[in-house]
Amino acid sequence: MTAHTVEVPEDNAVFGQTTSAFASFGYSAAVRAHGLLFIAGTIGRRADGTIPDTIEEQTEIALRKIEEILRLENLDTSALVDVTSYHVDIRRQLPGFIEAKKRLVRAPYPTWTIIGVSGLASPGLLVEIRATAAYPDAPR
């Protein structure tokens, strides 16, 4: 199997200083294999490393990071085929998440699984989103 690791440049404006997490925690932002792009869970941490208080802003930042990874691979959100989001305090936070998602995610829609969790990697994080995209040249 040939796999290609997507590298997010250290000076990337969308990720900012958060690119250090890839090396610190030992994972890749995304990996291309078998015509698919597997995007690691992204969180709503600002480029300066701070965490917004609102689910709307965290959702927007996480989705913008996914868009940036797709852009680095010459893709856009129409390439998304499967998304899973993990939510802290899901009953309270879901309406704000849905509003932010509606502003940023357009048809054709990927499959999407929404899961409630008791916590994420850092206090204050409310959502983490992982995704899989398909390359247009991949065999069907």
Image: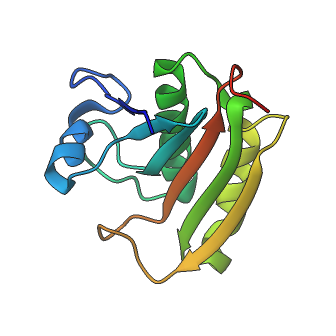
Which residue appears farthest toward the right when viewing the image?
Answer: 107
Which residue appears farthest toward the bottom when viewing the image?
Answer: 118
Q: Can the viewer see residue 125?
A: yes
Residue 19 percent across, percent down from the top left: 24, 37
- 133 relative position to 106: left or right: left
Instruction: Give the quadrant of the N terminus.
Output: top left
- 59 relative position to 112: left or right: left
Q: From what the image shows, is residue 55 above or below residue 15?
A: below
Look at 20% across and 35% down and name the residue there. Answer: 17
State which quadrant residue 90 falls in.
bottom right
Which residue appears farthest toward the front when viewing the image?
Answer: 1
Which residue appears farthest toward the left when viewing the image?
Answer: 24
Residue 33 percent across, percent down from the top left: 51, 37
Q: Nearer the viewer, residue 96 or 140?
A: 140
Look at 14% across and 51% down and name the residue there. Answer: 24
The tally of labels here is 0
Q: Can the viewer see residue 89?
A: no
Residue 66 percent across, percent down from the top left: 52, 37
Residue 9 percent across, percent down from the top left: 27, 22
Look at 29% across and 67% down and name the residue there. Answer: 122
Q: From what the image shows, is residue 97 above or below residue 10?
A: below
- 53 relative position to 50: left or right: right
Look at 80% across and 33% down and name the residue there. Answer: 140
Q: How is the image coloured?
A: rainbow
